[in-house]
Amino acid sequence: MKRRDFLRHSLVFVSGASVSLAALEFVSVGELLAARPEARWGFLVDTYRCVGCGFCVKACKIENDIPLEANVTRTWVERYLILKDGRVLADSPKGALHGFTDQRVDRAAEGFEEVSNQEIASAFFVPKLCNQCDNPPCVQVCPVGATYQTADGVVLVDHKWCIGCGYCIMGCPYGVRFFHPVEHVADKCTFCYHRISQGLDTACAQACPFGARRVGNLRDPDDPIARILLTQRVGVLKDEFGTKPQVFYLGLSKEVR
Amino acid sequence: MKNHVWRPLFVVIGLVALILLARAFYVPADFGTHERGYMYSYNRTGNIEEWKAFEAKYRGSQYCQGCHEDKTSALSAAQHAIIPCENCHGAAFGHPDDPEKLTVDRSRNLCLRCHAALVTPGSGRIQLPGIDAQNHNPGIECSDCHNPHHPNLAEMQG
C-alpha cells in the first residue's frame, strides 16, 4: 500500500465512522418516538386537604392485592407534629391503613408519646407514594432488567422477571419499594397503571373524599393537574438527589423528608 | 496448528454456542433495550400489557349509580356525599354477579378515621367535626344514633 493510499483510506474511515455515529445519534427513531408519547403521568398531592383518614391506603391495598395486615404498603400517610420547642415528631401507624384516630404519636420501640395540645405549633398529614422519577435510581440498579420506565413515565416491575435480589429496594431514596410477601418479588406503586391507561383515576385518588390526591397527564396543557403545576408553587421530595420526581406536593414544608 | 490447541478451543466454541442457543430459547423476543436506552428501559415490553390487563376492583360511585340511583341521589345533598360509596360499602369487584352482596363496614373505627378529634392546625382535619373517642358514647356504634348518609344532628335516629 502506498503512503498516499494509506492516508486516504484512514481519512475516509475516520470521517465515515464519526459521521455515521453522529447521524445515528441525530435521527434515533426510538428517541424521537419517546419524546412525544401521548401521555406523561404526574401526580399532585395537596397536603392542605389531607385529613389523614387513610382511605387511600385501604383502597390501594385492596385494588392491588397487597395483603391488608402485612406491614408493607404501596402508599402511606405520614403525620407530622411540629412542636413549639422546635421538635418534629412524625408517625405512620400501619401506614395509616386505619387512619389516624389517636392524638398520641407512635414512636415505634419507644411506645406512644403523649403530646399536649398546647405544645403543638402545627400538625399536618403528608401522603407518600412512588415518585415515578424521571431518573429512577431503582431502575439503574436492577441487574436483570425486571424494572423499567414506560414511555409515559411510569416505573413498573416485571413480576415474572424479578429475581428478588432487593437492590432496587435499597436503591430507592424514598423507601417506596418493598418485598411482596405473597409474590416474593419487588413491588411498588404503579400509579394504578391498569386504571389510568383506561382513563380511570388511581384507586387512591378515587377513594380520597377531599381531592388531596390527583393524577393527571402532564403533556396535556388543559389538564387540571398540569395547570396547577404550571401556575402554582409546588415542591418535590428530596430534590437534591436529582431523581426528578413526578409526584408534586402543594404545601410541602422543610420538615417533610 | 497442533491438536492440543484446537481441542480446548472447540470445547470453548461449543460452550459459547450452547449458551447462545439456550439464551435464544429462554429470553423472550420482546426483551431488549427500548425507548429510554439501556439504563431505564432494558426490559420485556410484554409486561406493559400484563400490567394494563390487571383487574380493577374499585368501580367508582358512577357504577353504583347505575342500579342504586335512589340511594345516590338521596345522598348527593348530604355532607357525606363527597365520600365515594365504596369507601364504606366495600370495593365492588364484579358486583352484582360476584360478589352478590357487599359487606358494609359499619364499625366505629371507620367513622373515627375522620371524626376522631386531633389537634392538627395546618391541615383540613380541624374543619371536620371531631369527637373524643374515649368519652363520646364508648362501646356503641356511631350508626346506632347517627345516619351515615345524613349525618347532621337534626336527623339523628331515635
Image (spheres, coloured by chain):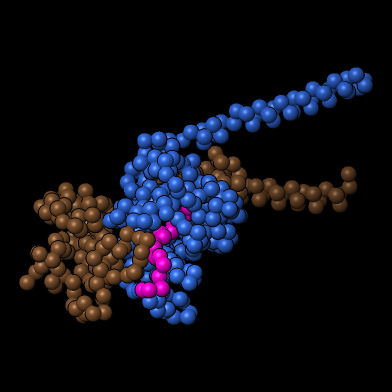
Can you tell which quarter of the image residue B125 is in? bottom left
Residue B30: percent from left, percent from top? 52, 42
Q: Colour of chain A?
A: blue
| Chain letter for the brown colouring in the rendering | B
Rendered position, B90 above or below B76: below
A154 with respect to A211 (left or right)? right
Residue A120 included in the magenta stretch of the image = yes
Q: Residue at x 68, y 29 (%)?
A: A22
Where is residue A224 shown, x and y percent of the image?
A: 35, 41
Look at the image and tell me whether residue A185 can be seen: no
A103 vs A172, left or right, is: left
- Residue appearing at x 47%, y 51% in the figure: A235
> Which of A119 and A8 lies nearest the eye of the viewer?
A119
Residue A60 in magenta stretch: no
The percent coordinates of residue A75 (x first, y second) are: 41, 60
Query: Residue B73: x, y in percent?
Result: 13, 51
Q: Which residues are magenta?
A: A117-132
Q: Is residue B28 above or below residue A102?
A: above
Quadrant placement of the N terminus of chain A:
top right
Residue at the (16%, 56%) spot, across then down = B78
Q: Is residue B128 above or below residue B69?
A: below
Towards the viewer: B64 or A54: A54
User: Is residue B10 visible in this depiction of the protein?
Assistant: yes
